[in-house]
Amino acid sequence: MVLLDVKENNGWLSSRWNLTYSIGWQQICKAVNSVYQYYNNAELLTDGMQVSISNPDDILKLDERSSMVIRGLSTIVKCPVMITFYNQMQFVDVTVPCMTDEFKTADYKSFNMSLGQYMDSIELAMYR
């Protein structure tokens, strides 16, 4: 994924990432399923409505919608993260709080260094 933009907004860094290809619902479900286990208190939303699941494989069976959000405390990034995937689109939005030294300012280079590999791993998981 390529970081397109990052900006600070009320104590949060909001970013947009460009995917290599447009993605469909199957790829979104695979991506969210692959990272779900690495979130504490993970919440899932489809089209803005909270979704309850009993195990991570339930994510692969969710009915198709226009978007899916996973949010919670990432054990990999070590802070709260919210990722929004859009069905049939070629971008992903990521939001993190300005709570750690790593995410204090909306600096493109340091933000890309902090999240670039993580986002690339998520994109790769879409095609497994």
Image (cartoon, rainbow, N blue to C red):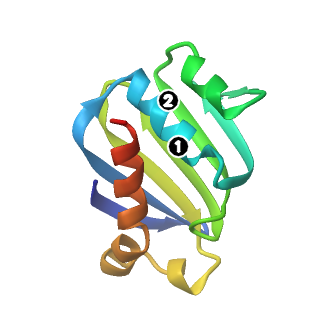
Q: Quadrant of the N terminus?
A: bottom left
Could you tell me which residue is drawn at 57 percent across and 86 percent down?
Answer: 101
42 vs 52: above or below: below
From the image, tell me which residue sits under label 2: 29
The residue indicated by pointer 1 is: 34
- Res. 40 image quadrant: bottom right
Dot 2 falls on a residue whose secondary structure is: helix
Residue for point 59% across, 18% down: 62
Question: Circle 1 — which element?
Answer: helix
Q: Could you tell me residue 38's position as x and y percent? A: 64, 55
Amino acid type at image mark 1: Ser
Between 105 and 82, the residue placed more toward the observer is 82
Q: Residue furthest front?
A: 128
Q: 2 or 37, which lies in front?
A: 37
**Height in image: 12 above or below 83?**
below
| Residue pictured at 52% horizontal, 77% vertical | 103
- Image location of residue 31, percent across then percent down: 46, 39
Q: Which mark is residue 2?
A: none
Residue 88 appears left or right of 68:
left
Residue 94: x percent and y percent?
47, 54
Mark closer to the observer (2, 1): 1
Horizontal side of 22 relative to 49 (left or right) equals: left
Question: Can residue 48 be seen in this snapshot?
Answer: no
